[in-house]
Amino acid sequence: MKVRRSGKARLTPYSLAVSLADVPDRLKYLLPRKWETVGNIAILKLRDELRPYDEQVGSAYARALGAVSVFAVEGLISGEYRRPSLRLIYGRSGETVHHENGVDYVIDVATVMFSSANHDERIRMAALACEGETIVDMFAGIGHLSMPIAVHSAPARIIASEASYQTYRYLLRTIDANGVRDVYDAVNIDNRLLEVKGADRVIMGYLMNTREWLDAAIGMCRKGATIHLHEAVRRNAIDEWKESILSDYGMGRVAIRSVRRVKGYSALLDHMVADLTYNG
Ligand code: SAM
């Protein structure tokens, strides 16, 4: 017996975008096969040849991915506030809510960085045993790393400093979106001005000479506290990196409990995190 197939085979989002994009056929092979989505916003890396067709490409990917806005990457995330460099090619704005692991992040992707590649680290943070702890998030962003703890791990208190006012405003909205105002205190200051003592855990999610802040982190800790130190480390030089932490903060002040690779950061560097114990 013959089985009659009904309807067309389903197109992948990429094939759909290619079929929808009103760009010359000779350029279609340049359309991106990968993209990042944050909430209902898509972010594409576009080749320069497609620049005259921003609008057509933006609208094709918006339809193919069900995105309300589409951005093209202009340059690297830069500066002390880690500001993205994106250009809007479809839609009105970069504001969205990104849902991940039961956490709602309120964000403007055009002004606040969000790394999809840090996903596993955010999941790891949510699974840490932090019940009753006082936690400091020194480089809070929109609570990328500490909001999962606030939502899932019943800490006593989280004190989060975010130096950029623009990002801080989204942090406040993220706190409200997750209903964690009772445990989460956000402050719009440079973390070196924090006056915290006796913290159980300090999160240092920043990759710009993070080591320079380690003294300040240690100063906030109780004996036995955990510090999550994020650094950009030369690939395959993990042992050297561990030795350099211990030689800078050795003599028993800190011990390295574990290290893990968060993601590739550049051609030569990996984003690593070391979980340290402050020995007092
Ligand atoms: N910690 C989050 C993560 O790892 O995904 C956010 C990372 S984002 C790269 C770092 C954030 O730290 C930025 O929002 C930046 O504005 C903020 N920041 C940089 N220097 C700071 C300082 N001295 N005090 C407080 N916040 C700072």
Image (cartoon, grey):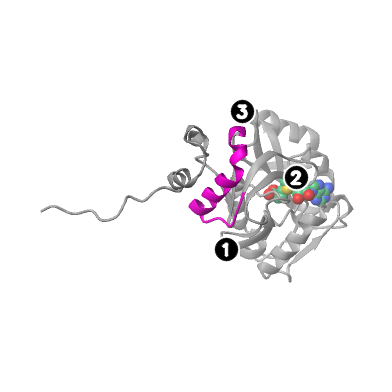
The answer to whether the residue bearing label 2 lies less than 8 angstroms from the nearest atom of ligand 1 is yes
The residue indicated by pointer 2 is 82
- Quick check: marks 2 and 3 in contact, CB under 8 Å? no
Q: Please state which of residues 177 and 192 is positioned toward the viewer in this rendering.
A: 177
Residue 130 visible in the current orientation: no
What residue appears at the point 65 percent right and 41 percent down from the top-left corner? Answer: 73
Residue 113 in the image: x percent, y percent?
Answer: 69, 48
The residue indicated by pointer 1 is 102
What is the magenta range?
Answer: 48-70
Give the residue type that dot 3 points to.
Answer: Asn
The residue indicated by pointer 3 is 236
Mark 2 vs mark 3: which is more N-terminal? 2
**Vertical position of residue 173 compared to residue 47: above or below:** below
Nearer the observer: mark 2 or 3; the answer is 2
Residue 64 in the image: x percent, y percent?
Answer: 48, 51
What residue appears at the point 68 percent right and 39 percent down from the top-left corner? Answer: 74
Circle 2: is it few (<14), some (14-19), or many (20+) Cα within 10 Å?
Answer: some
Mark 3 vs mark 1: which is more N-terminal? 1
Q: Is residue 69 left or right of residue 190?
A: left
Residue 170 in the image: x percent, y percent?
Answer: 73, 60
